Image: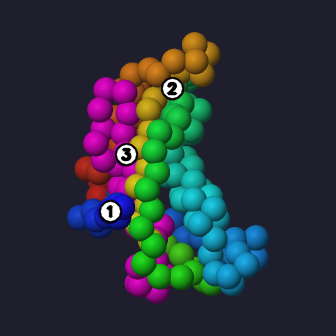
Amino acid sequence: MPRTRLVQQETYEFSSSVSVQPRDVNYGGHLGNDALIALVGTARALMLHALGLSELDLGDGKTGIVMTDLAVNYKAEGYLFDELLIETHVDELTRKGFRLSHRVTKGGRLVALVDTGFVAFDYASRRVAPVPPAFVKAVADRIAQGVP
């Protein structure tokens, strides 16, 4: 079976630092794959918060997100109390969804690349919905500012 191969993005508009905690370490003594996904989820929530948005409100008061897919390429191990930098890039913004590409590093060394797909979702009607213009504008403004 061929490997999924993710590539680093040219730019990352958002960044956040997280520390590997005891709960994040698996029986092998390194960062567990479930914990990595949780840490990337934290970075996503922090990114949305920096935009004045949330996973349940992309700016119109009713549209949130649902993850549709996830891919991870591991490049190095993470260990207890490592400080990880998680950088996030918003990509493939369409009428109904978008992708988030994450680069996870420690001390400048690549630990993992993580790619996640999302659809906009109206939780009241339980249906896929259009991405709100407020989200598109917030992302475009952040990119224009060039603020990581």
Q: Is residue 89 magenta?
A: yes
93 shown above or below 47: above
Camera-nearest residue between 138 and 8: 8
Comes first in the chain, label 3 or label 1: 1
Q: Is residue 15 visible?
A: no
Q: Secondary structure at mark 3?
A: strand
- 34 left or right of 64 in image: right
Q: Which amino acid, by three-letter code, is at mark 1?
A: Pro
Q: Which amino acid, by three-letter code, is at mark 2?
A: Phe
* Mark 3 Cα shell of 10 Å, populated few (<14), some (14-19), many (≥20): many
Q: Which mark is residue 128?
A: none
- Kindly identify which residue carries mark 2: 121
**The C terminus is located in which quarter?**
bottom left
The magenta stretch is 86-111
32 shown above or below 57: below
Could you say where residue 108 lies in the image, as x and y percent from the top left? 40, 84
- 131 left or right of 49 in image: left
Comes first in the chain, label 1 or label 2: 1
- Disc 1 to disc 2: CB gap under 8 Å: no
Could you say where residue 70 lies in the image, as x and y percent from the top left? 46, 51
* Mark 1 Cα shell of 10 Å, populated few (<14), some (14-19), many (≥20): few
Residue under the image location 54 percent in, 76 percent down: 84
How far apart marks 1 and 2 lie (CA) works out to 32 Å
Residue under the image location 48 percent in, 67 percent down: 86
- Kindly identify which residue carries mark 1: 2
Q: Which amino acid, by three-letter code, is at mark 3?
A: Arg
**The N terminus is located in which quarter?**
bottom left
Residue under the image location 56 percent in, 38 percent down: 55
Q: Main secondary structure of the magenta part?
A: strand
- Kindly identify which residue carries mark 3: 99
